Image (spheres, rainbow, N blue to C red):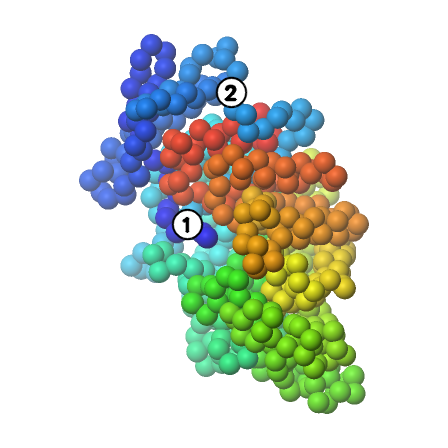
Amino acid sequence: MIDGSIGMACKCSVERRSGSYYYSDKVKEFCFNRRSLRKNLRSVSSTVLVFKRSLSKWRSVSGTKTRIVSMDVREKSKSTLFESSKHKRVPIYVMMPIDSFGIDTTGTPRIRKMKALTVSLRALKLAGVHGIAVEVWWGVVERFFPHSYNWSLYEQLFKLVSEMGLKLQVALSFHSNSHLSSRVQGVSLPQWIIEIGQHNKDIYYRDQNGFPNVDYLTLGVDNIPLFSGRTALQCYEDFIHSFANKFDSLMGTIIEEVCVGLGPSGELRYPAHPLQDGRWKFPGIGAFQCYDKYMMEDLRAVAWQEGKPDWANKGPPDAGDYNSFPSDVPFFENGEGNFLSDYGHFFLDWYSDRLLRHADAVLEIAANLLKKYQENEQTSVRVVARIGLLYWWYQTISHPAELTAGYYNTAFRDGYDPLTSMLSRHGAALQISCFEMLDDETPETFLCSPESLLQQIRAASKKRVVELTGRNTHQRFDEAGLTQIHSNCYDSQAEAVRSFTYFRMNEKIFRVENWNNFVPFVRRMSTDL
């Protein structure tokens, strides 16, 4: 899962001997208290000098107590993880730490640990990383009042990234991550949205028990003016418009990709698997999220229009709960009114269609506002949509984890063709996760297949001529994980992905044993070779 620690470079003791630098095997984690911060920064700065001096070529040799990084430019890399790809390069973005931002006592958002972040960005640049992925939070920028946008934090951050010679992948984040981890101060939705939600909890998705998920507005309010006279879609439009105006001079030169948030965690899906609050845990099938009054009103209207009033007032009655297994749930097996029945088709078609309509509307807004930045091929901004990869129970007939998330994909129906068709209309790329995952590493009992699901989505994207970008779900620095990422980025049956986002920067990435694998991985893929 996501590591909640802040992602800054590690403290390493460095000593020069006969043209080489020695690192102790026991790398101390970066300490951020006031007494040691300055000392740690000096240590990391020394480390960065090592990377700079050995930028062209380097090799590592393991010893019992020391690790040696050769400074001899005549030596070739001894990494055996990847074969050279002379004609293709995939730019690597590294996502900012999860707790990069904090709110001070005045309520003003601040960048945390600015000096340490600066050193970390410099190290990533020298390693060959192409750019940084940054979440631009609705709850930070339009925090206190509607139409009151404060971009100062991002102006400061984007300036720093630019000065380091790095590019930007920006994720416009209309969700909250405040429930992500008890160890980390997250970012909520805007305060004025929360105040509206205190009086009307139906602005959020609800499950069959009426429990709301407060991390994202329900798509049921997309066209209802509940937000100081604006609809949810108008709120998203005003935010994107303000962003484009503020950073017009960076678009296409520094800002190369804009990921448009479409749901929880920025992904186009329903919050059917809420891990953070303990309602769901792997490998539960999840729960349908359509029980707010606005979505239920829409369901009733569609059911009456279809001449099926009996289907108007509820979702599937025998769909289990978050942690059910499909074999225990009639709707996903052979029960009356199951997913293959007329009712099952009606409900799943409506449920998935409303999700696609939501994405269609938001991406149309984004595409129109960002259109002028796509006219010049040399400085074009790529618009990206993210989806989740719900790979457990994929080898069943019903694919229940995908169905509850809003992907109407079963053994008898390709749920990703209509999705990629919609993306194609807007010229949007698709970002998918789990690039590091192997079927053999998943529990056989739960009928997982991340590799098969990824191939299905790739095929749908190829058919609709939709560009792909990739991301990992779990941090991997081992040979198997990094090799799998490389293989998925350079699929022999398809075009190479347009970019890869490493998820995400934290102290683990700078540990010597991980860094010595991560740097060759980046060098083999980065456009900055």
Left or right, 296 with respect to 108, comes to right
Q: Can you give x and y, in whole percent of width and height, for residue 185 in the image?
A: 36, 58
Can you say whether 143 is above or below 95 in the image? below
Left or right: residue 156 compared with residue 351: left
Quarter of the image that includes the C terminus: top right
Q: Residue 75 in the image: x percent, y percent?
A: 50, 13
Disc number for residue 303: none
Lateral position of residue 180 relative to residue 415, left or right: left
Q: Residue at x 57, y 59 (%)?
A: 446
Determine which residue is flagged by label 1.
Answer: 3
Residue 105 position (above or below residue 296): above
Foreground mark, 2 or 1, reads: 2
| Residue depicted at x 73% and y 62% | 411
Give, as a three-letter code, the residue at label 1.
Asp
Is 63 in front, or is 472?
Answer: 63
Picture coordinates of residue 497, whole percent (x, y): 66, 40
The mark that comes first in sequence, 2 or 1, is: 1
Looking at the rendered structure, the secondary structure element under dot 1 is: loop
Tag 2: residue type?
A: Lys
Q: Quadrant of residue 88?
A: top right
Which quarter of the figure has residue 191? bottom left
Numbered tag placed on residue 78 in the rendering: 2
Q: Nearer the viewer, residue 410 or 33?
A: 410
Q: Quadrant of residue 12?
A: top left
- Residue for point 79% across, 50% down: 463
Q: Is residue 8 left or right of residue 291?
A: left
Q: Say which of 7 and 100 sits in front.
A: 7
Q: Is residue 274 above or below residue 529?
A: below
Residue at 64%, 59% (x, y): give it. 394
Q: CA separation, marks 2 and 1?
A: 30 Å
